[in-house]
Structure formats: C-alpha cells, structure tokens
Amino acid sequence: MLRAVVIGTGEYLPEKIMTNHDFAQTLETSHEWIVERTGIIQRHIAAEGENTSDLATIAGQNALKDFGISPDSIDLVILATTTPDDTMPSTASKVQHSLGIKNGAAFDVNAACSGFVYAMSIANSFIVSRQAKRVMVIGAETYSRIMNWEDRGTCILFGDGAAAVILEAQEAKGTNTDRGILFSKIHSDGQYTELLKTTGGVSSTKNAGYLTMVGREIFRHAASKMPASVEEGLLETGLGKDEIDWLVPHQANMRILASVAQKLGIGEDKVIATAPMHANTSAASIPLALHQAAKDGRISRGNLIACPALGAGLTWGCILLRW
Ligand code: ACO
C-alpha cells in the first residue's frame, strides 16, 4: 500500500515581535495575567503589505530548498488558512505560482485552527488513492488582520506565521511500523458555530469582520475533543499511548496543551509546545511545531507523533504520523 511520508518541512515567521508588555501599554492587562492564563509570552505580527501568501511562499521555498526538492515534483498544493489574501483566487493558487509549481492542482482549506489536520487528511486521501505523488501542505495565517485590538480576551491569544510540510507517496507494508500517516480522521459539528467566529464575511457584511469567542466554552470543547480524537486514532490503529513519542497538538495556549496531555496521560516532556513564542497561529501552529522540533532534533525518523486539533466550526480531528 501507499503511505504519505513527510520528506521536508519549512517555516516563516514575520520579523515583528509583539510582547505581552506591548499590550499592557494600551489595554487593561498584564504580562503576568497573560502568562498565567495562557503561557503565551510573545507573538509574531505580519508587516503591512505582508500577506498570508507571502508567509506561505517563504515557508514553502524553505521546505523545497532545505530538502533539495524540485517544485516540478509537487503535484498538489493544499493551503490551510482562515485568513486568505483575497476572496478569490485561492491563496493556494498564488502560492503555487510564486513557488514555480506548474503541475497538478492547488486549493485552500478553511477549517480554522483544525485547518492543518484537515489539509493533511485530504492530502493523505489524494496520496493513498494515487491521485497525487508529492503534496505540499501549508498552514499560513495572518490573524492579526481579524483581531479586535480593543478586546483583551482575544487579541492577546493569536499570532501570524506559516509552515509547510511536503508529503510523498511511498510504498509500505501497511503496518504500524510504516513511516507516514497511519491514521487521520476529521470531524465537524456546526451547532457550535457561534462559539468562535468573525463578525462578518463576504456574503454577509462584505468585509472580513473580527474574531469573537466564548473562551471558556472553547476551552471545554478543546480539552475534551482533542484527547478524544487521539484516543480514536489509537483505538483504530491498535497503537498504545506509550508508543507516542511526541504529542504535537494545535497550539491554542499552554493551559489547553497541559489539559490535553494530562487527559491522555502523556508527560509534559513529550509535548512539543511553541505557544509561548508564537501564540496561537491557527492552521500554522502544528506545522510550525513539527518543523521546529524536527529541526532541533527532538523529532527524529521513526518517531510516532500525534497531532490533535480543534477550531471554529466547531471542527476537530487528529493525525497519527510516523516521522
Ligand atoms: N487581561 C486581563 N484580564 C482579562 C484578559 C486579559 N487579557 N482577558 C480577560 N480578562 C478578564 C475577563 O474580563 C474576566 O474579568 P471579570 O471576571 O471581571 O469579568 C476575567 O479576566 C476572567 O475571564 P475569563 O474569560 O473567565 O478567563 P479564563 O480563565 O477563562 O481565561 C482564556 C480566558 C485564556 C481566553 C480561556 O478561556 C481560554 O484559554 N480559552 C480557550 C480559548 C482559546 O485558546 N481560543 C483560541 C481559538 S480556539 C482554539 O485554538 C482551540
């Protein structure tokens, strides 16, 4: 059978860094409050004129360059984002062109903070059904553009960034020792759309609006659905919790990460956490964490990685992946 195996990763974080202290200048908040409730210390913010496609393009270029992969060999680009450059064309089409990729297809996926898990699940389906051989999956966001900078309950939580993962179809035995995606499952329940949303959109208000959230409810859903989605993967594959080398969850905030790890009985030493330095970069958060941990040598070939996520929709899901 075919497996979708990660053969390269790349990232891009905008140059500008905004600290918690910067918020304390204009809002009734403090570094201490933000750290205690979220574990977030800083976030990157895209410059004016620096769009989601720009972040995604640099992340994609880095992945191609650092792993010696030719753009000609990529036959599908899936870009997970909730903050596209424009209503149309898709940001993926722009990125495909700026990366010099001419083969196959390109499209965006909007599943908010679950976007990367959704995109990986779709990429996996294309690969195992032999519709694509090399897929670039990118998570790229400029949430700074949809923040209400006067709402201290939301604007402190998010940041901008992008990361790319290149998946390749490789023949495998079909066992749990294979490299590649061993399990992927995505979910959605539209009864919860009001919990996390923007105040506008193309068809409703003709503008993007800004993000609003019922924080406590989102926390509750994330803390239950993310671990449940990992359990679902373990049950289906027959893998054990103790076989997970790294838990790389969507980086909502440190309290959510701690709660997910605790519910799964996974030690904090096995959790990759970038939320303190990046804040919540939505669809970019898991690939950023994967890239950084692979680069610094924590994640190595053969490791079993669990990536659960939850986002607006509500959407949620998990991939189990052997590096
Ligand atoms: N600084 C100071 N005080 C604040 C701030 C702030 N930045 N934000 C809120 N407060 C105040 C509130 O106004 C409230 O004051 P009040 O009691 O006088 O009304 C008080 O702090 C407590 O507010 P809560 O919202 O109840 O605080 P809570 O302990 O729930 O923490 C938080 C808020 C961190 C947002 C939490 O609910 C959370 O982690 N939710 C998950 C949300 C999330 O991460 N969403 C990301 C998108 S979805 C995803 O990625 C899964």
Image (cartoon, rainbow, N blue to C red):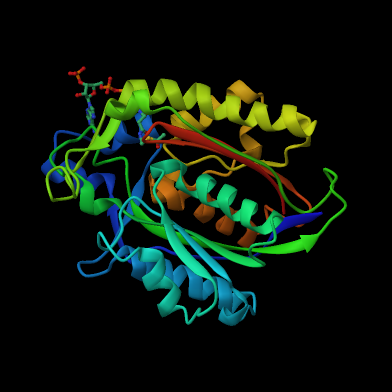
Closer to the camera in the image, 23 or 79: 79
Q: Is residue 219 above or below residue 310?
A: above
Task: Indicate the position of residue 92 as horizontal and vertical percent values.
Answer: 41, 65
Q: Quadrant of the N terminus?
A: bottom right
Residue found at x 72% / y 41%? 245
Closer to the camera in the image, 51 or 168: 168
Q: Quadrant of residue 230?
A: top right
Q: Quadrant of ligand 1?
A: top left
Q: Is residue 169 left or right of residue 120?
A: right
Residue found at x 78% / y 30%? 240
Q: Quadrant of the C terminus?
A: bottom right
Q: Is residue 305 above or below residue 291?
A: above
Closer to the camera in the image, 232 or 149: 232
- Farthest residue in the right direction? 173
Q: Is residue 64 left or right of residue 278?
A: right
Residue found at x 27% / y 27%? 194
Closer to the camera in the image, 101 or 57: 101
